Amino acid sequence: MLKRIKSLLSTFWRIFRSPSGYLSLGFLTVGGFIGGVLFWGGFNTAMEATNTEAFCISCHEMRSNVYEEIQPTIHFTNRSGVRAVCSDCHVPHDWTDKIARKMQASKEVWGKIFGTINTREKFLEHRLEMASREWRRFEANDSLECRNCHDEDAMDFTRQSPRAAEAHRRGLIEGDDTCITCHKGIAHELPDMAGVEGWE
Amino acid sequence: MRLIAIAIAVLGSSMAVIAAEGELDAMRGNVPLLEERTPEPLYDVENEDLRRVRAYPMQPPTIPHKIDNYQVDLNANRCMSCHSRVQVGESQAPMVSVTHYMDRDGNFLADLSPRRYFCNQCHVPQTDAPPVVDNTFVDIVELLRQPPDTEP
C-alpha cells in the first residue's frame, strides 16, 4: 500500500517536473492567468462577505451590544443617507492591513467559543479593555478608517460650527492630535472612563 | 329623576371645561381635543457657539452648542471632558463655575459635586422654534429704569 502511494507520488512528481509536451505555452499562460483570477476572486469574495454588517451582527455579542448602540448615532442614519457599517471603521480597506486584521479576528472566534463576552455584564466588564485596543489601533494608524470617509483636506472649516472649526484648527492643523483623540465614543457607548486621559 | 338631571348637568359642565381647555392649550395650537393636529416641524438646535445673556445672575446659562449623543451617565461625563477644571486648557471651553465644586454646606470639593453631575437638569440647549406662550418676564435692569411710581 505504502509502496503504491510512493510510486504514484513519484510519477506525479516526474510529470510535474518535466516540461509539457502536450500543452501549448499559450494555453499554460492563459490557463494560469484564469486560475489566478479565479483564486484571487474567490479569496476576495470571501473577504467581502465578512465585511458586511450582517456578518458582524450574526453574533449576538456584537448585535445586542454595539449594534444596538450605534443605531441612534449619526453614522447609522443621517441626512446624507451614507451609513458607516462596522467594517468601515473596524477593518482597514488597505489589503495588507486587511489580512493582518483578519488574523487578529480569529481571536474573536476563540472568544466566541469560550464565551468571554456572551452576556451584557461580561461585555461591560471587558469593554474598557476592548475599547482601549481600538483606540490604540486608531492612534497608531492616524485614524485611517475615519479618514477613508472624512478627509481633513476636504473639510471646509468655514462651514463647520465655530467650536468644531476651532478644535480642528488647534488639534489637526497646529497640533498632532488624531480624530480618535477627541471623538471617542462616536459610535458606541463609552466604557467607565475613570483614568482615561482627558476624562478624569 | 333629580339624580339623572344632576348627573347630566355635571357631565355637561365638565364637557364645557374640556372644550375650554382645548382653547387654552397653546402647545396643541387651539385644536379641539378630539381632532388630530398636524404636528409642528422639528426645529433645529441652535449651534452658533455664542453665549446668551442670562435673565438674572443665578440663572444656569443655556447651552450655546448642540449636545446630540453626549453621554452623561455612570461611566462617562462628556460635558466634563471639556468643561472640567483640568480640561479647559485643551478644550478652551469656559470652566464650570466654582459652585459646581461645592457641596450643599458650601465646602469646596476636589471634583465635581455629585449634585451637579447631571448637567441637563439645569442647562439646556435652545431650538429656533417660535415661543409657544408669550413671556412677560421683565429684566431687573428694566425694572430699575422705570420711574418708581409705575406699576410693572
Image (cartoon, helix red, strand yellow):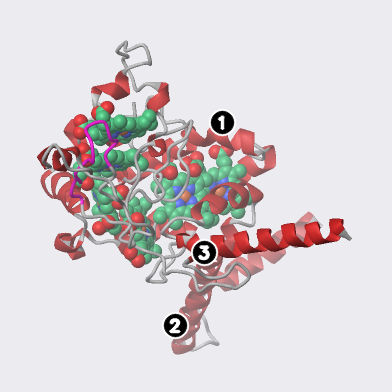
Residue extending furthest toward the front: B2
Tell me, for residue A47, which label it has, or none: 3
- Residue at screen point 24% across, 61% down: A151
Residue A137, compared with residue B98, is above or below; it is below
Kindly state the secondary structure of the residue where label 3 is placed. helix
**For the magenta stretch, what is the residue range?**
B49-61
* Occupied quadrant, residue A14: bottom right
Q: Quadrant of residue B58?
A: top left
Type of amino acid under label 1: Glu
Chain at tag 3: A
Q: Please rate how many residues cluster around mark 3, counting C-alpha atoms within 10 Å: few if below 14, some from 14 to 19, many from 20.
A: some
Amino acid marked by disc 2: Thr
Q: Earlier in the sequence, mark 3 or mark 1?
A: 3
Is A180 located above or below residue A159 in the figure? above
Q: Is residue B59 magenta?
A: yes
